[in-house]
Image (tube, rainbow, N blue to C red):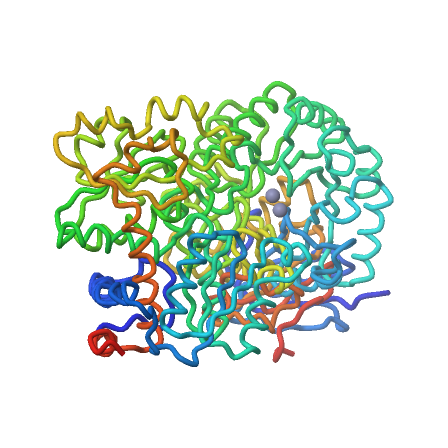
């Protein structure tokens, strides 16, 4: 299939990876960036899109989402997930392997790639499991999975309990140059917990998860990365203590990277309110002190990037007693707007910094193509309207999931177009 | 008069005026239990379901007496965990209840927040008869009534909750209720059985030693040490618990003043409380049981839109 050249004209080009911040055109030909900046005439057969008044940025990349296929196609498929990603401005997402069956072998990795190709939306990169069946005892065949297209390994959804297995995984994954992404949770300490341990849990009579259950694993992983030289990536950081430990590790040159989710940057445990299961996630929403530290860490680079931890669930599963409801919220379609509303609009960070954290940095951390508008780079581009205001409605989601704490909220900033390999895979309703 | 709203879910959200209204309504209702015919027609024609997902003979029987003495039609549904394991959710239960056009639901459930969950989904009045480790508001109210009977007012009185506060819904309801009514509240027990940061979270003083609590308090509310939780290793042994935290005659004898003793039951004698304390002159444990029925009558009555003057009138007239 040949794709006509795409010429985006008059947009505000914003790409911190090459210091781009000003009005200009962008030409995409044969799946790569052919020309960037200034006034571009473009070939005669080019599709022209007027981007005046819009920001044109490298496509966002989510290094952490759950697409549920295979196993729970009723709550999400790779196709619906990839379309939700596109609607949220993500040109690429990395799918966690806690599917049923677990993505722990090359055939499973190949299946995800095949489904993603058929979906014809955003790119989907598989993440393979660290251990066979995510059972935490035997390494899965990482070499073959990487050959089949896996970009990282993780047992996310479960912590790697055995320090020995984590050590071996870091050593072994080093061979293939991929990061080991860990869900940091000391299970005996977190056991039975359903929200942050603190004032609210004490009042609601809910069992708490102390910050230390995350921090103990954070420092363990950092020390093992120091020992092995393997690259550890810490998923969904939620506490100020974790931030201090990562800072300590980075200052010593230890190969550690970390991500933070939009909800941990913006919401506190107060959001649980009266047992609202749309505020139930793991790690749990914490305190204002944690939120402040996470925002500061994102700004100063201690935390490398934003990831959504998009986790769709069936409404019936969320519509029950708090303690028994599943963890997680959907996030692909709200991530940009939530962070624009809560961090960019008040001036805490600039839009350019946000693009760095949602696009350039994730590409760097996971070694993925994209994250830049540099000439010759893959033509993955997001066009957004920073001035738009919209109200979050579950029925508008491309994701099958509706479990969002922002339902009914009015957010600032919205994705207009998502361009993957030079082709528009998402154009907001009402736009030509 | 002060209205209660649709449901009674917790004491944390009640105002002092609402609590006072319930206690004031309960006071004259106590007399009904002393009559030859222990029945008033106040809730005639009202249908109440006692929905118990968790066994509790004491609370269920107390509610049942309260309902019958008010002439309501009461149905007991003991669900245990069986229906849940068969896949029926609380949402399904709510839908079924709504379809049966009942007037009130008394719910006991193992999940914190379950009563509120139900209340938000049905139009009937919902009374929380204990939800997980959250609250047990009618137990808190009966404890307040019992102490108010003795003291006239709770203002400035000092009450210490002793034992497993972490897992106790009774403790939370007591703490909120007592503080709203002007009492000072403390907790005492091993730190492993207290919520981390209890001082800030619940607004209480913490005593690590039972001797210090006894010296400070005007009343002790002694919570049951939950044997089923002992496998979780919160304390080393019951024997040691009794030696370090048990409320014994010897310890009470050293108190600077006479202490009132409460216990929500069921008691584990010889562990958290010794028999000579439980049966001693300062024990209000049986008063609590009597007051439990009156408080529950008052709550049922007020939630159905009743007026205290009518309740009193009914009593005075001997029906
Ligand atoms: Zn995780
Ligand atoms: Zn995850």
| Residue B207 placement (x, y as % from top left) | 26, 31
In the image, residue A110 sits, relative to residue A333, either above or below, namely above
Q: Going 53% across and 49% down the picture, which residue do you hit?
A: A261
Q: In front: B174, or A117?
A: B174
Side of A61 relative to A297 (left or right): right
Evaluate whether residue A262 shows in this view. no
* Nearer to us in this view, B221 or B93: B221
Please tell me in which quadrant of the rendered image residue B142 appears. Answer: bottom left
Residue at 65 percent of width and 20 percent of height:
A228
User: Quarter-wise, where is residue B219 in the image?
Assistant: top left
Total tally of numbered discs in the picture? 0
- Residue at figure coordinates x 73%, y 45% from the top left: A97
**Closer to the camera in the image, B310 or B69:** B69
Percent x, y for residue A401?
63, 63
- Report the side of A5 relative to A192 (left or right): right
The quadrant of the rendering that contains the C terminus of chain A is bottom right
In the rendered image, residue B206, in percent from the top left (x then y), is placed at 26, 34
Q: Can you tell which quarter of the image residue B30 is in? A: bottom left
B254 or A93, nearer to the observer: B254
Q: Where is residue B244 shown, x and y percent of the image?
A: 33, 23
Q: Residue furthest top?
A: A227
Residue at 46% from the left image edge and 61% from the top image edge? B115
Q: Considering the image in quadrants, where does the N terminus of chain A appear?
A: bottom right
């Amino acid at each position: 299939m040949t794709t006509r050249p795409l010429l985006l004209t008059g947009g505000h080009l914003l790409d911190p990876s090459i210091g781009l911040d000003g009005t200009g055109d962008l030409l995409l030909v044969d799946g790569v960036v052919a020309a960037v900046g200034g006034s571009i005439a473009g070939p005669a057969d080019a599709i022209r899109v007027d981007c005046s008044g819009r920001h044109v940025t490298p496509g966002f990349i989510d290094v952490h989402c759950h697409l549920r296929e295979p196993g729970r196609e009723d709550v999400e498929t790779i196709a619906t997930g990839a379309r939700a990603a596109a609607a949220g401005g993500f040109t690429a997402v990395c799918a966690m392997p806690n599917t049923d069956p677990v993505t722990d072998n090359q055939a499973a990795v190949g299946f995800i790639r095949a489904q993603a190709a058929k979906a014809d939306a955003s790119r989907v990169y598989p993440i393979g499991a660290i251990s066979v069946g995510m059972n935490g005892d035997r390494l899965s065949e990482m070499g073959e999975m990487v050959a089949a297209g896996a970009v990282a390994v993780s047992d996310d959804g479960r912590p790697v309990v055995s320090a020995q297995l984590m050590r071996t995984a870091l050593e072994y994954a080093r061979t293939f140059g991929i990061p080991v992404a860990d869900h940091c949770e000391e299970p005996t300490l977190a056991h039975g917990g359903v929200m942050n341990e603190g004032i609210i849990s004490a009042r609601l009579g809910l069992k708490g998860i102390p910050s230390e259950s995350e921090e103990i694993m954070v420092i363990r992983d950092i020390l093992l990365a120091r020992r092995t030289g393997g690259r550890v990536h810490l998923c969904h950081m939620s506490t100020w203590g974790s931030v201090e430990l990562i800072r300590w590790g980075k200052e010593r040159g230890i190969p550690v990277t970390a991500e933070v989710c939009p909800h941990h940057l913006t919401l506190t445990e107060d959001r649980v309110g009266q047992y609202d299961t749309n505020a139930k996630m793991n790690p749990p929403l914490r305190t204002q002190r944690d939120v402040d530290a996470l925002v500061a860490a994102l700004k100063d680079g201690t935390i490398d990037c934003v990831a959504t931890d998009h986790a769709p669930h069936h409404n019936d599963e969320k519509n029950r007693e708090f303690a028994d409801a599943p963890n997680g919220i959907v996030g692909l379609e709200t991530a940009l707007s939530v962070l624009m509303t809560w961090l960019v609009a008040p001036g805490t960070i600039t839009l350019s910094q946000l693009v760095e954290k949602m696009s350039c940095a994730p590409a760097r951390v996971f070694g993925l193509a994209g994250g830049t508008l540099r000439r010759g780079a893959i033509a993955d581009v997001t066009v957004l309207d920073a001035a738009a205001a919209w109200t979050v409605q579950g029925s508008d989601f491309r994701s099958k999931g509706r479990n969002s704490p922002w339902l009914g909220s009015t957010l600032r900033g919205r994705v207009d177009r998502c361009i993957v390999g030079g082709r528009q895979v998402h154009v907001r309703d009402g736009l030509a | 008069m002060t209205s209660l709203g649709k449901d009674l879910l917790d004491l944390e959200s009640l105002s002092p005026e609402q609590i006072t209204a319930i206690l004031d309504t309960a006071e004259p209702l106590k007399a009904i239990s002393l009559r030859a015919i222990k029945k008033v027609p106040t809730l005639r024609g009202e249908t109440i379901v006692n929905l118990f997902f968790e066994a509790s003979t004491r609370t269920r029987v107390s509610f049942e007496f309260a309902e019958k003495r008010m002439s309501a039609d009461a149905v007991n549904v003991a669900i245990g965990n069986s229906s849940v394991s068969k896949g029926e959710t609380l949402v399904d239960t709510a839908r079924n209840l709504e379809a049966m056009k009942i007037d009130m639901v008394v719910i006991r459930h193992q999940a914190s927040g379950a009563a509120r969950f139900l209340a938000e989904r049905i139009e009937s009045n919902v009374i929380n008869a204990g939800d997980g480790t959250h609250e047990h508001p009618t137990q808190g109210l009966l404890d307040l009534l019992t102490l108010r009977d003795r003291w006239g007012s709770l203002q400035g009185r000092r009450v210490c909750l002793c034992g497993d506060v972490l897992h106790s819904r009774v403790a939370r309801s007591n703490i909120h209720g007592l503080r709203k009514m002007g009492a000072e509240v403390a907790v005492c027990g091993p730190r492993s059985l207290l919520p981390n940061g209890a001082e800030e979270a619940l607004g209480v003083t913490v005593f690590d030693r039972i001797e210090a609590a006894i010296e400070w308090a005007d009343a002790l509310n002694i919570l049951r040490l939950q044997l089923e939780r002992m496998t979780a290793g919160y304390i080393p042994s019951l024997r040691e618990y009794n030696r370090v935290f048990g409320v014994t005659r010897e310890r009470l004898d050293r108190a600077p003043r006479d202490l009132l003793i409460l216990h929500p039951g069921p008691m584990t004698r010889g562990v958290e409380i010794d028999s000579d304390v439980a049966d001693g002159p300062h024990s209000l444990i049986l008063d609590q049981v009597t007051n439990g029925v009156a408080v529950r009558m008052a709550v049922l009555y007020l939630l159905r839109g009743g007026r205290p003057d009518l309740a009193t009138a009914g009593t005075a007239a001997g029906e």
